[in-house]
């Protein structure tokens, strides 16, 4: 969910989230759980949806959190889409890439 959504923005600015986020960073000793570098972002493994934004078992539960560095967080989000970490279209996975090749001819 986009942070431009008022409910999402409210959640990420809430004292509850800020406390849980800080506690989780400390729990993980500030290290990225994937590569071991300095962790920056407390990521929700199960992405938050409009349906569960108010469900603390999803939004505030340590079992649904993962501390990631910025690079690993970007890989998490971009690898599931048609874009690379640099924001470039993935040629091997995108039908949009094929469409672009057609229009270039």
Image (spheres, rainbow, N blue to C red):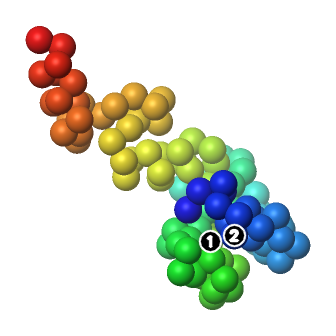
Image coordinates of residue 67 in percent, x first then y, are: 65, 61
Q: Is residue 29 left or right of residue 58?
A: right
Residue 105 image label: none
Within 10 Å of disc 2 (Cα), the crowding (few <14, some 14-19, many 20+) is some
Residue at image point 11% right, 11% down: 105
For the residue pair 58 and 53, the one nearer the viewer reads as 53
Quarter of the N terminus within the rendering: bottom right
Q: Which residue is mark 1?
A: 65
The residue wearing badge 2 is 7
Query: From the viewer's perspective, is residue 85 above or below residue 103?
Result: below
Which residue is pictured at 63% across the width and 44% down the height? Answer: 70
Between the residue at mark 2 and the residue at mark 1, the CA separation in whole angstroms equals 19 Å
Instruction: Find residue 7 and report its horizontal and vertical position in percent.
Output: 69, 70
Q: Is residue 69 above or below residue 60?
A: above
User: Could you tell me if the residues under marks 2 and 1 are in contact, i.e. CB atoms within 8 Å?
Assistant: no
Choose top left, top right, bottom left or bottom right for residue 54: bottom right
Give the tally of numbered discs.
Answer: 2
**Residue found 74% across the figure and 70% down from its top:** 11
Q: Nearer the viewer, residue 103 or 35?
A: 103
In this rendering, is residue 90 above or below 14?
Answer: above
Residue ranking furthest to the top: 105
Residue 26 relative to residue 93: left or right: right
Quarter of the rendering containing residue 58: bottom right
| SS under mark 1 | strand
Of all residues shown, which one is farthest toward the front? 6
Look at the numbered disc 2 and give the secondary structure of its residue: helix
Q: Is residue 42 visible?
A: yes
Is residue 45 visible to the viewer in this orientation of the structure? no
Label 1 Cα neighbours within 10 Å, binned few <14 / some 14-19 / many ≥20: many
Location of residue 89 in the rendering, given as x and y in whole percent from the top left corner: 34, 31
**Earlier sequence position, callout 2 versus callout 1:** 2
């Amino acid at each position: 969910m986009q942070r431009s959504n008022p409910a999402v923005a409210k959640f990420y600015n809430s004292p509850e989230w800020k406390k849980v986020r800080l506690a989780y960073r400390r729990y993980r000793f500030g290290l990225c759980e994937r590569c071991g570098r300095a962790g920056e972002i407390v990521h929700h493994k199960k992405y938050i949806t409009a349906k569960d934004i108010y469900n603390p078992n999803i939004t505030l539960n340590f079992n649904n959190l993962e501390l990631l560095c910025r690079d690993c967080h970007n890989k998490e989000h971009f690898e599931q889409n048609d874009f690379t970490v640099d924001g470039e279209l993935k040629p091997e996975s995108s039908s949009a890439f094929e469409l672009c090749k057609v229009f270039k001819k």
